[in-house]
């Protein structure tokens, strides 16, 4: 069988690429090795699907620290606001939540996935499920896609949209890297991002803080010179293996990149009171002690900090929890508060790539034309989505990147077939 455009991968970028190609008159085939389309979309945003983000374009790109600047050019053609219009045009009502995150009004990812599938039907895109690709052969006139069944498919334009290696149960198992290499492309080193971090600290090993959630704290990754590389203010949680939660996920890629440089461990800096100055906290605590000298020291601080973290700090500074506040020295008080504002601990790794939300690394963006998503090395070959070396924070940024790059890959793959007709 011959097609104008063959898209491999039925995730967000592959679905968008297929729709864009078909809308532009290309006879389009979408191949998906799994049993369902949009598996990753269906589980994103806790099953509600964080479709995109309404922040200004500049802010969205800032939230894609892994080569987000590559998207300036694609965004000039199709951006996050166009994504909102695209879905609302298909009847999917969207609502804005915190930090600009856009969700379907239905609160169900199925609404988003079904709208995309219905659009494929409407445009007569041929979809083949449970159809793994065995190999890809490139040629001067057209490319050949060989299926596991042995069947050969011929296409003028090929779009590889198979994702990275994160969340492999959705079908992202890194199949596309070998096909990209065959066309002469470089695959930059793969690593986990948006991932929980592991630590060998005693309080992690003895599980004394396991399950402790901290809300609205400031978490920084320190470089070798103990200067912050990045700081995020969000929630976090201590786990049986290390740390996790939104602030940790956002910091994780910076930790992983430092470890990739050969560092044995990386220091994290936690500020439990990001809105309060250290001296302000000290003076307020001294005042309380003056007013309640017979109160235990722990009870003076208890309301301001989670109890288990406070117990940990008191143990470090060898202060008895029941010790009368008036008997604790000013220096000891200063030290405890200093550590609550500057709690340093080390992490030495992360959970593996298969446990990460997003893949770092991939097809080098230097080898892809930004405005078209076409390979610089092979005619009729396009890349989109997570197979590219582009990665952002959670919050709709990776799906935005996938949908934008998918849209452009589909548009230009269709245009190339017309130009060559």
Image (spheres, grey):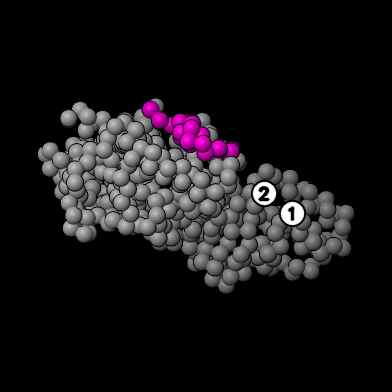
The residue indicated by pointer 1 is 304
The quadrant of the image that shows the C terminus is top left
State the residue at coordinates (12%, 42%): 139
State the residue at coordinates (33%, 40%): 124
Residue 359's mark? Answer: none
Callout 1: few (<14), some (14-19), or many (20+) C-alpha neighbours within 10 Å?
Answer: few
**Residue 357, x across and y down, in percent:** 45, 54
Res. 257 in view: no
> Do the residues under discs 2 and 1 have CB atoms within 8 angstroms?
yes
Could you say whether the residue bearing mark 2 is in a helix, strand or loop? loop
Q: Which residues are magenta?
A: 77-96
The residue indicated by pointer 2 is 273
Q: Is residue 24 left or right of residue 402?
A: left
Q: Residue furthest bottom?
A: 206
> Does 191 appear in magenta?
no
Q: Is residue 237 left or right of residue 8?
A: right
**Residue 323, x across and y down, in percent:** 79, 67
**Residue 366, x across and y down, in percent:** 27, 38
Callout 2: few (<14), some (14-19), or many (20+) C-alpha neighbours within 10 Å?
Answer: some
> Does 85 appear in magenta?
yes
Task: Give the mark nearer the N terminus: 2 vs 1.
Answer: 2
State the residue at coordinates (35%, 35%): 20
Could you say whether the residue bearing mark 1 is in a helix, strand or loop? loop
Depicted 121 relative to depicted 194: above or below = above
Q: Is residue 277 left or right of residue 355?
A: right
Res. 113 in view: yes
Depicted 334 relative to depicted 405: above or below = below
**Residue 77, x across and y down, in percent:** 38, 27
Label 2, label 1: how far apart the Cα atoms are: 9 Å
Depicted 339 relative to depicted 370: above or below = below
């Amino acid at each position: 069988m011959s097609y104008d455009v063959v898209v491999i991968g039925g995730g967000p970028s592959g679905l968008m690429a297929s729709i864009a190609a078909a809308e532009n008159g290309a006879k389009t085939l979408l191949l998906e090795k799994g049993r369902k389309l949009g598996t990753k979309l269906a589980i994103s945003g806790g099953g509600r699907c964080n479709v995109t983000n309404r922040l200004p374009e500049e802010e969205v790109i800032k939230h894609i620290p892994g080569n987000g600047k590559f998207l300036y050019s694609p965004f000039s053609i199709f951006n996050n606001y166009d994504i909102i219009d695209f879905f609302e045009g298909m009847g999917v009502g969207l609502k804005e939540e915190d930090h600009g995150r856009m969700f379907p009004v239905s609160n169900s990812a199925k609404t988003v996935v079904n709208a995309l599938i219905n659009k494929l039907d409407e445009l007569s895109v041929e979809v083949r499920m449970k159809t793994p690709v065995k190999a890809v052969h490139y040629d001067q006139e057209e490319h050949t896609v060989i299926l596991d069944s042995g069947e050969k498919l011929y296409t003028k334009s090929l779009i590889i949209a198979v994702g990275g290696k994160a969340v492999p149960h959705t079908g992202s198992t890194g199949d596309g890297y070998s096909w990209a290499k065959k066309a002469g492309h470089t695959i930059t080193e793969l690593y986990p991002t948006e991932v929980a971090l592991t630590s060998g600290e005693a309080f992690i090993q003895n599980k004394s803080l396991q399950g402790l959630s901290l809300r609205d704290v400031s978490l920084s990754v320190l470089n070798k010179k103990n200067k912050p590389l990045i700081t995020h203010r969000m929630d976090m949680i201590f786990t049986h293996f290390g740390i996790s939660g939104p602030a940790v996920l956002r910091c994780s890629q910076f930790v992983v990149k430092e470890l990739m440089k050969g560092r044995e461990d990386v220091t994290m800096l936690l500020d439990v009171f990001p809105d309060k100055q250290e001296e302000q906290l000290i003076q307020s605590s001294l005042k309380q002690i003056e007013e309640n000298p017979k109160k235990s020291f722990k009870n003076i601080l208890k309301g301001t900090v989670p109890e288990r973290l406070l117990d940990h700090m008191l143990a470090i500074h060898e202060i008895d929890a029941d010790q009368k506040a008036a008997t604790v020295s000013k220096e000891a008080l200063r030290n405890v508060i200093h550590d609550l504002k500057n709690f340093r601990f080390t992490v030495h790794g992360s959970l593996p790539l298969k446990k990460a939300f997003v893949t770092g690394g991939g097809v080098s963006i230097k080898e892809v034309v930004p405005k078209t998503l076409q390979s610089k090395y092979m005619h009729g070959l396009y890349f989109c989505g997570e197979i590219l070396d582009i990665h952002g924070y959670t919050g709709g940024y990776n799906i935005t990147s996938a949908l934008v790059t998918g849209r452009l890959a589909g548009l230009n793959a269709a245009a190339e077939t017309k130009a060559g007709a």
